[in-house]
Image: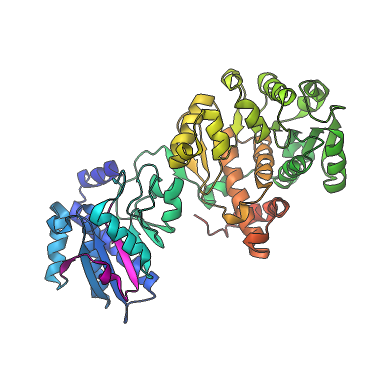
Amino acid sequence: MRAADEAAISSGTPALVLMERAGRSVARAAQRVAGGSYGRRAVVVCGKGSNGGDGFVAARYLARAGMSVGCYAVSGAERAQGAARHHLRQMEMQGIALRPFSSQCLNRCDVVVDALFGTGFRGRAEGEAASAIEAINAAPASVVSVDIPSGVDGATGACEEVSVLASVTVAMGVEKLGTANSAGAVRAGRVEISDIGIPVIEASAFMVEASDAASALPSREQDAHKRSGGSVAVLAGSNDITGAPVLTARGAVRMGAGYVTVGCTSAVKHALATSCPEVLTASVTDEDVLGPRALDSFAEVLDRADAVALGPGLGRGLPQQELVARVLEEVELPVVADADALNALSEDTSVLKRRRAPTILTPHPAELARLLDSSVPEVSSDRMGAARAAAGELCSVVLLKGFRTIVAHPSGRAVVNPTGGPELATAGTGDVLTGAAAALAAAGLDDLSAAWAACFVHGLAGSVAASRLSWSGVLAWDVAESLPEAAQLLHDGTVAVA
């Protein structure tokens, strides 16, 4: 972001002007959060850097709008330099004094502006700054953060407990990785983008917008037939685990696949026949689990398939490991690998480096930690970094599930998905996502696009289901059944997300 600021200044936009625009945007957001200006009180907490300067400007505009405003200094804000010092003087000329911060200043206020630390923050807030953050979080008022909640690492989203929990974060120009990644995504609240004239610079990470997803989804011609929708082959399930393959197949069907065929055990075949008659089955083993010889029995289906969904419900064991290795070694189709396929790969990932066809891996943090021989805390502290590292090391697109799902490509490109919420925190929703991603890959989308588009629609489907039921009562089946409605909302252009 510093490079973008410097580009704006070098192109002729003075730092004073950028700061003025930023502070004005923050003031507008604070007014909305406070429910207006009349009779309202705002407290602006400023640090010594550029964020503090934005806070000085916000204080001026809030006072001009009719609010009672108090501006308080933390960590040497009174010693501001450059553009921030200019705006401090402008604020004082308007009659607003900069006073030392104390927790009592937060009594009876309607909104707090957090202008303490900016996107350059790293490490842990300490001393006076930590005390101020704790007081802000303890106050009953809503909080508007400037660019990023104070205490959150601007590059990774990592943060200690001592970090601001914002109601709204006003991001200048673009949303920062720190509020799209890891714990920072939760601390940021609702992120609002403000265009203050910072020029667009080349970026390697992007937030998906509804228009992106709408453009990516395949259309269906008037003379379409079932083969033109793409054919998905599924290798999943076991006699002990029959639900996962059903949900995977349902996700593929509801995402638009014209043909879905599941290679399965006898118990899975029965489960599919009674719950998902649209799906074809192929008996590929007499055993309780799928082993490497199942691939030979499934060869005819694979010859006609366009993509493969692999892993949900396979179970763990040597036969399953050998099956996963054979599929990835021999099947030259896009493969979406999830769940027990990832568990098998954690024993030996070398086959991924030898693959010629696209591979999409869909781990949750624990699965990714095993693939990287790392730990869940390490993955969670920098989800973007972990996903990118895995994509490069494993020569695959990596879809790291969780709040603000990250999709990373081996080239280093990465995408953040804004859809989905707590309604997806239930068993089986990942299986639905696997099927949906396989359907889009079968329809002809490249591996990165299939992964992020499936994420967007899947998350939106969760919201659609929650709007009918309740986030606490949504089941994976409900998410699968809501995929067509989510896709239609995108087609109609009526999605308000991102």
Viewer-closest of 94 and 188:
188
- Position of residue 150 relative to residue 143, above or below, is above
Tell me, what colour scheme is on the image? rainbow
Q: Quadrant of residue 412?
A: top left
Q: Quadrant of residue 66?
A: bottom left
Q: Is residue 468 left or right of residue 448?
A: right
State the extent of the magenta-drawn residues as a range: 97-117
Q: Is residue 257 left or right of residue 175?
A: right
Viewer-closest of 77 and 28:
77
Residue 355 position within the rendered picture, expressed as x and y whole percent measured from the top left: 61, 20
Residue 330 position within the rendered picture, expressed as x and y whole percent measured from the top left: 69, 19
In percent of the image, x 16 and y 61: which residue is there? 87
Residue 221 visible in the displayed image: no
Residue 401 position within the rendered picture, expressed as x and y whole percent measured from the top left: 56, 43
In percent of the image, x 22 and y 67: which residue is there? 71
Q: Is residue 24 left or right of residue 459?
A: left
Residue 279 position within the rendered picture, expressed as x and y whole percent measured from the top left: 82, 41
- Quadrant showing the N terminus: top left
Numbered disc total: 0
Magenta-span inclusion, residue 123: no
- Position of residue 260 relative to residue 417, above or below, is above
Residue 435 visible in the displayed image: yes
- Position of residue 94 relative to residue 26, above or below, is below
Viewer-closest of 444 and 359:
359
In percent of the image, x 78 and y 28: which residue is there? 290
